[in-house]
Image: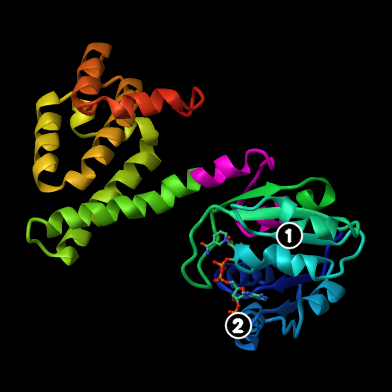
């Protein structure tokens, strides 16, 4: 790696440990680690196989390393960085998707280079694979180049991202991951509402979800669309609205809203014509048209729908 040869970690949790292990496995030298608890820091140290120094403060990591990943929870990153003295040309990086490099501004006042390095993946435990994960890199200069090289070395795909667009980037992940989990929860609850078991629901719906993901992978998020909207099946949609109104009224507004957002996907697929799209829009709009009004008031940019 050009310029940065001793890597340190502050925060030895799910991502820090996963990243440190992957970097060590691909020949990067992990030299020092600090975490709130000694046990976590020691676990990360063991995972690298390099016997990095387990440090009792972030400052020791900063002093020993020329590239430091601050992989603590987002809400303490700035506090830790602000309490540490940094060096000119040292690299200081966080892995948050929600924060920008502004959180590292204190390090920049010492002349350190700052960047964020966010893997678009969900890590529920240390040691998950990073293979194939896209990593958004916010920053510039030799640090950004070294991070892109590092991302490629561990089997990831680097993409450059601006501070201005970081929030939109992060929201896309919320839609593709967190809200899919929420939708699965709601779908499972609909099974329970019929007196069926949640375990059976999970098995059935996971198979469906995996099939859907495979279709998206194969044909893209437009061509993968199936179901009543893609079929222009107005009677089924009207029947769904009736069922929800009586049996799960809390989901009615969400069904209408997602339905409205699905119509342009069906049109882009070439599955329905404008006449059918209009009919579906009317059926799906609420009794007082509140959804249509709120959408037009906050219409997103073209291309994002
Ligand atoms: N998990 C994900 O899916 C994911 C995905 C992309 C990006 N990220 C980002 O990665 C970063 C880390 O997230 P994570 O999920 O790995 O969190 P995590 O599993 O909770 O790990 C955070 C680690 O930081 C340590 N820590 C907490 N407060 C500290 C402090 N004041 N000083 C030193 N160490 C401290 C914790 O300590 P102890 O264990 O020692 O008590 C813990 O090991 C965040 O910026 C997050 O946004 C996470």
What is the quadrant of residue 160 in the picture?
Answer: top right
What is the quadrant of residue 230 in the picture?
Answer: top left
104 shown above or below 216: below
Who's the residue at 63% across and 38% down the image? 165
Mark 2 lies on residue: 40
Give the distance between the C-alpha atoms of the residues marked 2 and 1, in whole angstroms: 20 Å
Is residue 226 left or right of 300 when viewed as pictured?
left
Is residue 37 left or right of 298 when viewed as pictured?
right
Q: Residues within 10 Å of mark 1 (few under 14, many from 20)?
A: many
Q: In the image as oriented, which residue stretches furthest toward the top?
A: 275
Placement of the C terminus among the 4 image quadrants: top left
- Cβ of disc 2 within 8 Å of ligand 1? yes
Residue 58, position as x, y percentages in the image: 76, 76
78 shown above or below 139: below
Mark 2 near mark 1, Cβ–Cβ under 8 Å? no
Q: Which mark is residue 93?
A: 1
Q: Nearer the viewer, residue 213 or 273?
A: 273
268 shown above or below 109: above
Who's the residue at 29% across and 25% down the image? 263
Q: Residues within 10 Å of mark 2 (few under 14, many from 20)?
A: some
Report the magenta residues as a range. Answer: 147-171
Q: Is residue 28 visible?
A: no
State yes or no: residue 251 in magenta: no
81 shown above or below 103: below
Residue 18, position as x, y percentages in the image: 58, 69
State yes or no: residue 165 in magenta: yes
Q: Is residue 214 visible?
A: yes
Is residue 93 left or right of 194 when viewed as pictured?
right
Is residue 110 left or right of 206 when viewed as pictured?
right
Residue 69, position as x, y percentages in the image: 72, 65
């Amino acid at each position: 790696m050009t310029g940065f040869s001793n890597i340190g970690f502050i925060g030895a949790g799910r991502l820090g440990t996963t990243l440190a292990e992957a970097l060590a496995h691909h020949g990067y030298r992990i030299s020092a680690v600090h975490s709130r608890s000694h046990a976590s820091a020691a676990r990360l140290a063991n995972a690298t196989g390099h016997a990095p120094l387990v440090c009792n403060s972030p400052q020791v990591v900063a002093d020993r390393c020329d590239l430091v990943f601050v992989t603590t929870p987002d809400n303490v990153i700035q506090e830790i960085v602000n309490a540490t003295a940094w060096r000119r040309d040292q690299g200081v990086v966080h892995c948050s998707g929600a924060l920008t490099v502004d959180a590292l501004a204190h390090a920049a006042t010492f002349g350190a280079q700052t960047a964020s390095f966010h893997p678009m993946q969900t890590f529920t435990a240390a040691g998950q694979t990073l293979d194939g994960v896209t990593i958004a890199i916010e920053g510039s200069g030799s640090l950004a180049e070294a991070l892109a090289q590092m991302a490629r070395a561990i089997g990831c795909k680097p993409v450059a991202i601006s501070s201005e667009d970081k929030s939109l980037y992060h929201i896309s992940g919320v839609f593709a991951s967190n809200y899919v989990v929420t939708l699965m929860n709601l779908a499972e609850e609909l099974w329970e509402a019929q007196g069926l078991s949640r375990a059976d629901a999970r098995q059935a719906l996971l198979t469906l979800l995996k099939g859907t993901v495979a279709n998206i992978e194969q044909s893209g998020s437009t061509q993968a669309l199936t179901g009543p909207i893609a079929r222009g099946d107005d009677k089924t949609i009207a029947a769904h609205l009736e069922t929800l109104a009586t049996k799960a009224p809390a989901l009615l507004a969400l069904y209408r809203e997602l339905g409205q957002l699905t119509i342009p996907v069906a049109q882009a697929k070439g599955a329905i014509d404008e006449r059918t799209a209009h009919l579906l829009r009317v059926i799906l709009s609420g009794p007082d048209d509140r959804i249509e009004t709120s959408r037009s008031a906050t219409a997103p940019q073209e291309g994002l729908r």
